[in-house]
Amino acid sequence: MELTVDLFGVRFQNPVLLASGTCGFGAEVISVTRVEALGGLVTKSVTLEPRAGNPAPRVAEFGAGMLNSVGLANPGAGRVRREALPWIEANLSATVVFVSVAGHTTEEYSQVVQILDDGPGFLGFELNLSCPNDAQRSGLPFALDPEALHQVVSGVRRRTERPILVKLAPNTPDLTPVIRAAEDAGADGLTLVNTLPGLIVGPEDGRSVLGAGAGGVSGPALRAVGIHAVWSAAQQTDLPLVGVGGIGSGKDAAQYLAVGASLVQIGTASFWDSRAAERSVHELRSLGAARGARSVLELRGAPIVPGSARTARSEEPAPDRESVPLG
Ligand code: RRO
């Protein structure tokens, strides 16, 4: 089965990317996973100044996933431009790289993009508007505030012609206003979803297990939330969607594709199995072939979900199936 996906003016050799925050800038993972066999990767989020990050422990496992509060640790835009991007150009030319960008203010996003934009080795930006662990930014994350999101995205849009992905947060009852704002401000695609705010405390002392207190939930616990967010977004926009949250296998990836994702990202699963992304590519190929699909694009389609949403996209009667076929 053909795995290639043409999007944003380039060909992805398959739809599986490594998610931001789980693969550094590529150099950190090439000894444990064959990045060049993947569709691509998204770097750790880059801020204007270097950030040391939050106190340890920064991650904790729990039964259904992982909680993290890394606190945006990164070397800052200047060093990324001077060191990471040339390394990426020299070593990862077989795959597609997006640079994730974060900031406390609207202007910080634009400044980071301005510093990186003429750099080598990467296709576009993923604007991280949804970090749950940014203690210095008071109030809502940009991704939960349509006006703030619009300002950030339109500011960046004025400074780059590269593709812009906007990474959204899962903890909103209605994605419509932020999707409209992202579209209107010139986004080229949406990434759904970042981690979900969470807290784990020791049962004996009631103290947070993470050094920073609360954090973001990822892993299997997030999968149904992410699939729902992609499905919901697919009802409302024609922008390409990148699905992320709890994917650890080809079957998981296929669920995201079935509800409308064009690409997927794998994050936390790589911590448990460093080859999870590569394995998922193989599993996706087998799963598609078993279904008789000639291309992975055939796995992408209008979701079949019981209830009102089933016919939201079309007046045609739904096929006689009860759930998304997952192979
Ligand atoms: O660095 C982090 O703590 C972090 C970020 Br920027 C993010 O976007 N999502 C997350 O779960 N952790």
Image (tube, grey):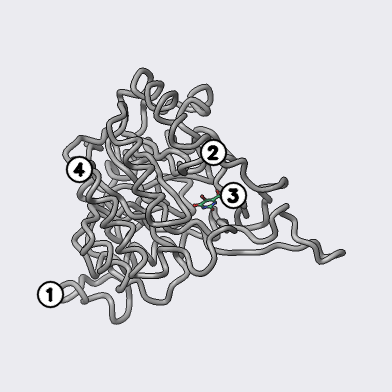
* Residues at discs 3 and 2 in contact (Cβ within 8 Å): no
Residue in the foreground of this view, choosing between 219 and 194:
194
> Which mark is on residue 50?
2
Residue type for callout 4: Glu
Inter-mark Cα distance, 4 to 3: 29 Å
Give the residue pinned by disc 4. Answer: 161
Inter-mark Cα distance, 3 to 1: 47 Å
* Residues at discs 1 and 2 in contact (Cβ within 8 Å): no
User: Earlier along the polypeptide chain: callout 4 or callout 1?
Assistant: 4
Q: Is residue 269 left or right of residue 153?
A: right
On screen, residue 326 above or below 273? below
| Residue at figure coordinates x 60%, y 47% from the top left | 70
Q: Is residue 144 left or right of residue 210?
A: left
Residue type for callout 2: Pro
| Residue at figure coordinates x 21%, y 64% from the top left | 184
Label 3 or label 1, whichever lies nearer to me, is: 3
Residue type for callout 1: Glu
Residue 130: x and y, percent? 45, 59
> Which mark is on residue 316?
1
Quarter-of-image position of residue 41: top left
User: Earlier along the polypeptide chain: callout 3 or callout 1?
Assistant: 3
Label 1 or label 2, whichever lies nearer to me, is: 2
